[in-house]
Every structure is written in C-alpha cells, then in structure tokens.
Amino acid sequence: MSDIKSTHAGALKSGSYVLINGAPCIVKDTQTSRPGKHGHAKVRVKATDIFTGSTKEVVMPGHDSVDVPIVLKKQGSITNIEGENIDLMDLETFETVAAELKYADVSVKDKLEAGQTVMFWQIMGKIMIKSIVEE
C-alpha cells in the first residue's frame, strides 16, 4: 500500500493533509485567487508540519497535482518503553510497531507508561502518538 496519493491543489481545505517539500503537513488555511484573462487560479496554502510543528506556506496553480500523505489513525497498547523507543501493539491487527518518543505529541510525552492505551497516527512509515485513551 502506498503512503501517498495525489489530488489537485484547488481541492485542499482546512484540516486536510498535504506534503510540502516532502514533509507531511496539516492545512490550516487556503486562499484561492481568481484567474486572470490568460492565467490560472492560484492557491495559497498555509500548513503546519505534523512532526515539527513549523509553519509552511506555498503558492501554486489550482490545477496542479499535489501529494497527500495517507494518515492511518489507530489505537494501540504500549508494551514497552526503553529510552527513546516505544513498542506499541496495534489493537486491531495485534502486530507490534516501534515508535520514537520524539514523535509523541508534547501534551502526552511525559505521561506515557507501559500498559496504557494510546491513539497513534501512522504517517509515511513514522508513528506519532497523539493522545492517551482514558478508560
């Protein structure tokens, strides 16, 4: 299964995902300019990098194809934490995946413990822990 798909830049909306310079980002805002007499509509995309939190902005023709990362949102159980490495068991498939603590959301980074159930995102081969599931 591929980690990315293509769409038109004009189809991007706030909350959707897009690859900007190879980095997966969440779209925060889009603005579309009207086409001129001989030109094409331009789309200005403001987005936030999913892993680093940095803001990125690009302008492109609305008919251009852009790459969109496929984001899989899953629940898992933390089986082990060793240094910066976290082992998770996917609760749907029961397979074990490895995550890095540096990709965990800052709101949960210090609260992670073995045995907890967490919501995690799988994006382009990287695992990001988003939240702790309260039971």
Image: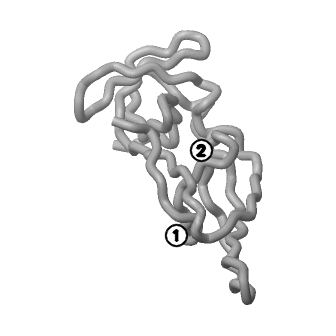
**Measured from the top left, where is residue 19 in percent x and y?**
60, 48
Residue drawn at (74%, 59%) of the image: 58
Left of 126 or right of it: where is 87? Answer: left
Within-10-Å neighbours for mark 1: few <14, some 14–19, many 20+: few
**Mark 1 to mark 2 CA distance (whole Å):** 17 Å
The amino acid type found where label 2 is placed reads Pro
Q: Are marks 1 and 2 in contact (CB under 8 Å)?
A: no
**Measured from the top left, where is residue 82 in percent x and y?**
53, 10
Q: Where does label 2 land, which residue?
A: 24
Q: Where does label 1 land, which residue?
A: 11
**Measured from the top left, where is residue 87 in percent x and y?**
43, 18
The amino acid type found where label 1 is placed reads Ala
State which quadrant residue 95 falls in: top left
- The residue nearer to you, when weighing 44 against 102, is 44
Q: Which residue is situated farthest in the front direction here?
A: 38
Residue drawn at (56%, 22%) of the image: 100
Q: Which image quarter is the C terminus in?
A: top left
State which quadrant residue 33 falls in: bottom right
Within-10-Å neighbours for mark 2: few <14, some 14–19, many 20+: many
Q: Is residue 124 above or below residue 29?
A: above
Left of 98 or right of it: where is 32? Answer: right
Mark earlier in primary sequence (1, 2) = 1
Report if residue 122 is visible in the image.
yes
Residue drawn at (42%, 41%) of the image: 119
Coloring scheme of the render?
one colour
